[in-house]
Amino acid sequence: MEKTRPKLSVADDPPDLQRLGVAIIGVGSVGRSLARSLALSGYRVAALIHRSKKSVQEIGTETSAQVISQRVRDIPQTVRLVFICTRESDYHTVIDDLIESAIPLQNTVVAHVSGRESAAVLAPLQEQGAMVLSFHPLGSFAPSAPDKMFRGLTVGLEGSVAAVEIGRCVAEDLGAIPVEIPTDLKSAYYVSAVMTSNFLCTLMGDVQELLYRAGLPVTLTHSLARDTLDNLAELPAEQALTGPIVRGDVQALKAQVATVKEIAPDILKTFVALAQANVNLARSGNRITGAQADEMSIILTEAHEA
């Protein structure tokens, strides 16, 4: 049985989100990727709003955007789906501009793409009748990296019931995986996202520095990182763990500490902290004994204090 798609108004029959006019405010890394994904999924990109028109001409042409402007008030009145992809610090200005625009907010979904903010930040628009939504793609949108598509990404949805249902349909149209996040769990969701992406970059930065100082290619362990993430997609972390610690190999751990001290002593503190976390994870998963964990913890404590 085909799932009924939500309507924006009683006049929207048959309900077809793809024929709605979509506006994107803020066409940076996320905004460009979203515009391209929407256009390729059959959505009509009616407006791209950005502080520099020149910088979005290419994506505007690619998506056949009806309007490319620096002003929110230039968004066509036919638009019924608005994505705010600006910095969070600009939200209040954008909200004021939308309220002053000619868009009939009572029949419009307004979404932001922030992982930190809940849909409540859009409350002034909700008071004007808009359905408000947090539509956060769990992807790494580095400014210097090639634009990516939303297909295959998880999208965290939070907001009013009606807006979440529409967000779910949009995410599915893009080939993304929609997951509703309860408002009171949004902060935990955001922290987990930061740890997953940002902390991984920090870790790999230290790995690359160690490799560089040793005279080895800095990309040497990239395939290992991908393989580990593949394992984590299928296994809990304590079962995906491999290497000398989970084998209880004390001598290998001592040798690793000595190598880091010799080649990159400035990252020893990070190595020790992560190695201890490895010991704790291996012990919690019953991969090593308590005695093995204690012995390795002593080695790491001595390395930290040396």
Image: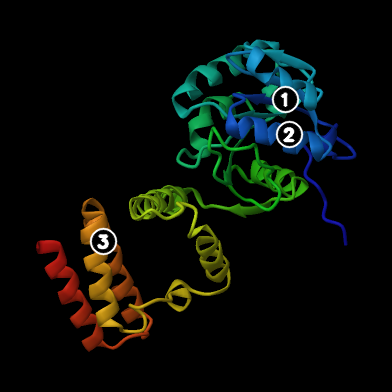
User: Which part of the image, by quadrant, shows the N terminus?
Assistant: bottom right
On residue 36, the disc is 2
Q: Nearer the viewer, mark 3 or mark 1?
A: 3
Residue at image mark 3:
260
Viewer-nearest residue: 144 or 232: 144
Looking at the image, tell me whether mark 1 or mark 2 is earlier in sequence order: 2
Q: Which image quarter holds the C terminus?
A: bottom left
**Residue density around tag 2, few if under 14, some if 14–19, many if 20 or more, within 10 Å:** many
Sequence-earlier tag: 3 or 2: 2
Quarter of the figure with residue 298: bottom left
User: N-terminal of the two: label 3 or label 1?
Assistant: 1
- Say left or right for 41 vs 105: right
Give x and y (percent) for residue 297: 20, 75
* Observer able to see residue 8: no
Q: Are the residues tagged 3 and 1 within 8 Å (C-beta)?
A: no
x 71%, y 49%: residue: 151
Q: Residue 182 carries which label?
A: none
Residue in view at x 36 percent, y 86 percent:
286
Check if mark 1's residue and mark 2's residue have beta carbons within 8 Å: yes
Q: Is residue 162 above or below residue 217?
A: above
Per the model, the C-alpha gap separating discs 3 and 1 is 46 Å
> Secondary structure under badge 2?
helix
Write the residue at 54% across / 26% down: 86
Q: Position of residue 49 (x, y in %)?
A: 65, 18
Which numbered marker is on residue 59? 1
Q: Do the residues labelled 3 and 2 touch (CB within 8 Å)?
A: no
Distance of label 1 from label 2 (alpha carbons): 7 Å
